[in-house]
């Protein structure tokens, strides 16, 4: 038993060693994997530096030759080279790549020196991009213009020969062809950018100046340079075209002279880049080889991984051996323990054999074996069983006595239940009669409530009719008042008509007087006034008819005024009657409202009576139902009393059987038990 904690401690130690070995092994593997990824990135960047060094050289040469796309490619290559070089110098935070290790410091320094020189020359070329492109554009234009000048001068020479011009003019024109050829050659030399480009630029300037002076002399004459004026019209036309073409050449002289030194520096920088690119290629190759050799320098980490793996394997083997030895030892101990337990069980079975026959006086021996606790429990159980059997005997005797008393009480309770059932049956019949009477009262109250509701509805309708009548009479009163006002205005208007008629009557009388005066004047005039007398007679008759008509209108107006006054008086009386009728209708409405209130109160009282009757009916029904339930409970109680008597008899039999069942146990004597 003492060796078991020792084995457990050994297994624990070996497990700790195993876990540490596995953790260190995985850590070493992760470190090697990370370093391998870093080496891969280092080698990739170094390889790209080799490619970019040659790409920069190629693009620099093409840029110096005036290709516009080459400048962009050169800038991209320079930026890409600088970006990858910064990854190697400072690391890449996005990918987690650290700076290059110190083991490749020499290779890094060599690449750095070459790259700084190459970058300076590259920046020189990129800074002169506009100058180079502009100069090449000028050169391209000159390459197109100069041949045209030559063609035109050849035509001038032909015209001069055909026209019989002086020989010196022909010779001058032919020298212009040679100057044009020299100008084109000087431009090409300048574009080449070699050591003679500066001299070629100076020669271009002198030849262009000489060409312009001769051209101007052929057009206008110049004795200073011994060039006479050309007189032939066709030749002069050709010379004028040549002068227009030569304007671009003369305008480009200053630009070529100023930019040729810068172009020379660009060409020199391109040459330097080409030579440096080879050196940079070799240094970048050495740097890539240095990165490739980094893995060979990590042999210690690889050996450490193998050692940790072997240590983990040894720990697993030792754990297996310790566990096997511990298992064999535990099996031997278990076999010995099982043998001892078997012997103790056989002794225990021999001692409790009499207990199986019902002898409760037996006491089992308690030993130090594992059966000792079982023997102690058996002794405790036997003691409890003794007390239980004694208690059962005593309880059986008490139950027998109590059963006899309970049986007598059950018989008396059954008789009382029968008498109670008879009394409850009579009470249920009385409650049923009361329920029928309350139902009839409730029905009568319900009918009365309906009648009261109809009375309320009729009173409400009558009140509404009265209100409508009052409203209608108010409308009639307002209409009568409006009619009276109109009749009054009609009387006033008839009065005004009377005044107007009086005025017309006065006018008719005056017209009649004027007609008489006119008739008198006409009679005095004799024959000359006869026509006027006729008119005066007509006016007089008209005035008489107007006077007669005004008297008739005056009589009608008086009649209308009399009728109007009578109508106004009648309207006033009618209005007074309508007002009295409205007051009577309002009094009737007040009476109907009081009737409606009384009817409403009576309906509410009748509803309350009906609700109370219905509540009493419901309560009486519940009482009747409760009485029926009580009667059923009483019947069940009576039946239960009989069943209780039967159960008590059965309980008496069970007590007797219980006493017989424990009679087979042997108990100690009372003296010993106490």
Image (spheres, helix red, strand yellow):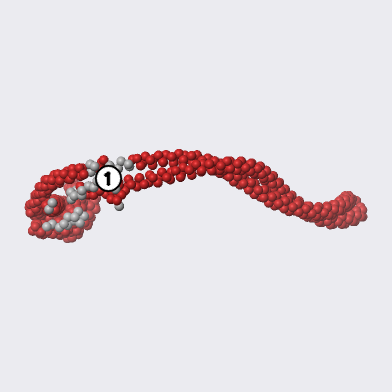
Camera-side residue of 647 and 62: 647
Q: Residue at x 12, y 53 (%)?
A: 2
Question: Viewed as shown, does residue 69 lie left or right of 552?
Answer: left
- Name the residue rendered at 8%, 51% in the picture: 307
For residue 349, side relative to residue 288 (left or right):
right
Q: Position of residue 440 (x, y in %)?
A: 66, 42
- Residue identified by numbered label 1: 360
Point out residue 33 in the picture as x, y percentages from the top left corner.
Answer: 14, 51
Q: Nearer the viewer, residue 533 or 564?
A: 564
Say left or right for 3 vs 529.
left
Q: Secondary structure at mark 1?
A: loop
**Residue 24, relative to residue 437: is it above or below?**
below
Is 539 on the left or on the right of 293, as rendered?
Answer: right
Q: Residue at x 56, y 43 (%)?
A: 420
Q: Position of residue 585 (x, y in %)?
A: 76, 52
Q: Residues within 10 Å of mark 1 (few under 14, many from 20)?
A: some
Q: Percent x, y for residue 67?
A: 19, 51
* Res. 598 in view: yes
Image label count: 1
Relative height, residue 507 to residue 648 (above, below) = below
Q: Nearer the viewer, residue 324 or 168?
A: 324
Q: Is residue 226 visible?
A: no
- Residue drawn 16% across and 59% down? 90
């Amino acid at each position: 038993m003492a060796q078991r904690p020792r084995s457990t401690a050994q297994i624990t130690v070996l497990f700790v060693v195993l876990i540490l070995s596995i953790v260190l092994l995985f850590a070493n593997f992760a470190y090697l994997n990370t370093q391998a990824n870093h080496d891969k990135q280092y080698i990739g960047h170094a390889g790209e530096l080799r490619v970019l060094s040659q790409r920069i050289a190629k693009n620099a040469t093409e840029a110096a030759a005036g290709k516009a796309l080459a400048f962009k490619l050169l800038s991209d290559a320079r930026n890409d080279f600088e970006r990858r070089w910064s990854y190697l110098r400072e690391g890449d935070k996005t990918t987690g790549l650290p700076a290059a290790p110190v083991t490749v410091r020499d290779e890094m320094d060599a690449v750095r020196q070459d790259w700084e020189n190459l970058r300076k020359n590259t920046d020189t070329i990129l800074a002169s991009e506009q100058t180079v492109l502009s100069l090449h554009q000028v050169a391209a234009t000159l390459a197109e213009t100069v041949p045209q000048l030559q063609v035109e001068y050849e035509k001038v020479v032909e015209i001069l020969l055909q026209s019989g011009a002086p020989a010196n003019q022909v010779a001058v024109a032919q020298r212009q062809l040679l100057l044009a050829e020299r100008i084109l050659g000087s431009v090409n030399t300048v574009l080449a950018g070699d050591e003679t480009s500066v001299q070629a630029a100076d020669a271009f300037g002198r030849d262009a100046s000489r060409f312009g002076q001769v051209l101007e002399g052929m057009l206008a004459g110049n004795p200073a340079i011994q060039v006479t004026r050309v007189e032939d019209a066709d030749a002069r036309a050709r010379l004028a075209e040549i002068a227009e073409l030569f304007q671009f050449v003369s305008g480009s002289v200053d630009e070529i002279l100023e930019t040729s030194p810068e172009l020379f520096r660009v060409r020199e920088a391109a040459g330097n880049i080409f030579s440096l690119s080879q050196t940079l290629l070799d240094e970048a190759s050495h740097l890539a080889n240095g990165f490739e050799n980094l893995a060979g320098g990590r042999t210690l980490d690889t050996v450490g991984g193998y050692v940790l793996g072997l240590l983990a394997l040894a720990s697993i083997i030792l754990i297996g051996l310790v566990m096997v030895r511990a298992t064999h030892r535990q099996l031997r101990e278990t076999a010995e323990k099982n043998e001892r337990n078997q012997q103790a069980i056989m002794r225990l079975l021999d001692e409790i054999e009499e207990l199986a026959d019902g002898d409760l006086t037996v006491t089992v021996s308690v030993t130090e074996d594992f059966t000792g606790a079982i023997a102690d429990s058996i002794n405790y159980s036997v003691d409890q069983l003794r007390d239980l059997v004694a208690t059962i005997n005593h309880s059986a005797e008490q139950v027998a006595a109590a059963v006899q008393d309970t049986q007598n009480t059950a018989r008396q309770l059954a008789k009382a239940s029968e008498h109670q059932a008879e009394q409850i049956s009579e009470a249920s019949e009385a409650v049923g009669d009361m329920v029928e009477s309350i139902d009839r009262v409730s029905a009568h109250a319900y009918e009365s409530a309906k009648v009261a509701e109809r009375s309320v509805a009729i009173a409400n309708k009558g009140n509404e009719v009265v209100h409508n009548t009052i409203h209608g009479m108010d409308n009639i009163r307002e209409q009568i008042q409006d009619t009276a006002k109109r009749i009054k205005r009609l009387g006033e208007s008839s009065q005004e008509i009377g005044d107007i008629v009086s005025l017309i009557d006065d006018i008719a009388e005056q017209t009649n007087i004027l007609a008489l005066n006119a008739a008198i004047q006409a009679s005095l005039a004799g024959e000359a006034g006869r026509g006027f007398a006729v008119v005066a007679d007509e006016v007089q008759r008209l005035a008489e008819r107007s006077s007669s008509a005004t008297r008739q209108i005056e009589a009608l107006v008086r009649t209308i005024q009399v009728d109007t006054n009578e109508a106004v008086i009648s309207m006033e009386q009618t209005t007074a009657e309508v007002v009295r009728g409205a007051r009577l209708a309002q009094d009737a409405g007040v009476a109907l409202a009081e009737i409606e209130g009384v009817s409403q109160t009576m309906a509410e009282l009748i509803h309350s009576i009906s609700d109370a009757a219905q509540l009493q009916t419901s309560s009486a029904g519940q009482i009747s139902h409760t009485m029926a339930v009580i009667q059923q409970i009483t019947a069940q109680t009576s039946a239960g009393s009989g069943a209780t008597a039967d159960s008590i008899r059965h309980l008496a039999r069970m007590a007797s059987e219980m006493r017989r069942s424990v009679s087979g146990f042997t108990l100690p004597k009372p003296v010993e038990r106490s």
